[in-house]
Amino acid sequence: MLKCPNCQSKDIGKIGINQYYCWNCFIELSISKGIINTHQVEEDGTLSSLDDLFEEELRRYTL
């Protein structure tokens, strides 16, 4: 089960192919090569990476 690396919530919604949204802390997540990439949605709709805030170990995703 996918957990948000930011808040550890499991309240994750799917918004596209390998794209998810955390309804608890409102960040967008995408999965690429087993790594969860985290993004903040800006007011203008663009995405800013938050990956540098989390160690890669916290961002690993395995089924």
Image (spheres, rainbow, N blue to C red):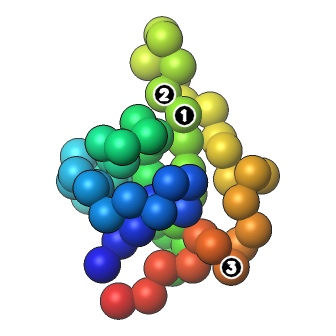
Determine which residue is flagged by label 3: 57
For image coordinates 41% across by 36% down, the residue present is 26
For image coordinates 66% across by 44% down, the residue present is 50
Spatial CA distance of label 3 from label 1 is 20 Å
Whether pointer 3 and pointer 1 mark residues with C-beta atoms closer than 8 Å, the reply is no
Determine which residue is flagged by label 1: 40
Whether pointer 2 and pointer 3 mark residues with C-beta atoms closer than 8 Å, the reply is no
Please provide percent x and percent y for residue 61.
48, 79
In what element is the residue under mark 3?
helix
Q: Is residue 60 above or below residue 25?
A: below
For image coordinates 50% across by 54% down, the residue present is 7
In what element is the residue under mark 2?
strand
- Under mark 2, the amino acid is Val
Front residue of this view, candidates 6 and 61: 6
- Reading the chain from its start, which is encountered first: label 3 or label 1? 1
Whether pointer 2 and pointer 1 mark residues with C-beta atoms closer than 8 Å, the reply is yes
Spatial CA distance of label 2 from label 3 is 23 Å
- Under mark 3, the amino acid is Glu
Q: Is residue 40 above or below residue 21?
A: above
Q: Is residue 33 above or below residue 11?
A: below
Q: Is residue 16 left or right of residue 2?
A: left
Spatial CA distance of label 2 from label 1 is 4 Å
- Reading the chain from its start, which is encountered first: label 2 or label 3? 2
Please provide percent x and percent y for residue 4.
45, 60
For image coordinates 77% across by 52% down, the residue present is 52
